[in-house]
Image (tube, rainbow, N blue to C red):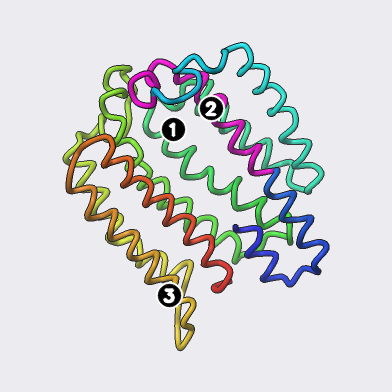
Amino acid sequence: MFTIAVAWHHRLPPERFVLTVAGSVLYFYLYLYSFCLTNQLTGRLEDRVNKPFRPLAQGQALIRGTIVRTVVVFAAFPLVGALLGVWEWALIWEAMTVLHNLAGGARRWVVKDLVIGFGALPMLGPAWQMVAPLTAESWRWMLALAVPIFLLIPVQDLRDLRGDTASERVTFPTAFGEPFARAFLSAGFALLPLLDHFLILRASGTSVPAWLAEAITAGLCWTIAWRVTRQRTPAYDHRTYRFFEYWYTAILAAALVTL
């Protein structure tokens, strides 16, 4: 989505537009797949409690086959990055993936949240750089998304409290307590639309599309702020986290009208 927005902003000719977007789809498939493979390899025990539907937890995929796929993907990802001119970002993301999934970083809330939050940089950076060189505007977008994601990603952990406690994984809610975590997240999401307005969307004047984008993203934030103080079941908290994903998608889609 962000590559499409940046390509539209720079008015790429049709043939380059299509090739760039196709390359972006392949690149970010490998971006996600490399992380998910290693995450599920090392998270098999807690997945039996938190996410028993996953292939390794169900026995539908073999450990050996998953390791083979991981090696292939880790080799292919920077090669695809090199073809697109963003190989440095690919290596940075692989290093962050190893830190998070294979070096035990996911078991410490600071490392876990830093990797997820600032993983937005090796996501949005190459998405922009595939189209054009990075600018001050691109760094504004990247940092204005990375920082709040780092601060608010603990909303993801609310759904997994039982499994994380059983496996002795230290997340933000288990470290500071569920009541404080919910209060912190509710306040953070309530204030997030202000940051979105001043640093990212910056709707002004009679720009109806930009104001519509602000309304949609603000509504998603306030929905999350309300939901985290309500029911406390894994299924309910999982749906609440989904709204955070919708916010991120909506923000990137808004780049089509706000860049």
Callout 1: few (<14), some (14-19), or many (20+) C-alpha neighbours within 10 Å?
A: some
- Image depth: mark 3 or mark 1 in front: 3
**Are the two marked residues, 1 and 2, in contact with CB atoms closer than 8 angstroms?**
yes
Secondary element at tag 3: helix
* Chain-order first, disc 3 or disc 1: 1
Above or below 259: residue 44: above
Name the residue at 54% across, 73% down.
258
Q: Which residues are magenta?
A: 27-51
**Which residue is label 2 attached to?**
99
Callout 2, which amino acid?
Answer: Leu
**Which residue is label 3 attached to?**
212
- Image position of 26 (left or right of 100): right
Main SS of the magenta part reads helix
Above or below 206: residue 15: above
Residue 123 versus residue 143: which sits nearer the camera? Answer: 123
Name the residue at 27% across, 29% down.
161
| The quadrant where residue 154 appears | top left
* Chain-order first, disc 1 or disc 2: 2
Q: Position of residue 15 (x, y in %)?
A: 83, 63
Q: Position of residue 204 (x, y in %)?
A: 45, 83
| The quadrant where residue 91 appears | top right
- Image position of 39 (left or right of 25): left
In the rendering, which numbered label is found on residue 34? none
Asked whether 83 falls inside the magenta stretch, the response is no
**Which residue is label 1 attached to?**
111
Callout 3, which amino acid?
Answer: Leu
- Image position of 247 (left or right of 33): left
C-alpha separation, residue under disc 3 versus residue under disc 1: 35 Å
C-alpha separation, residue under disc 2 versus residue under disc 3: 39 Å
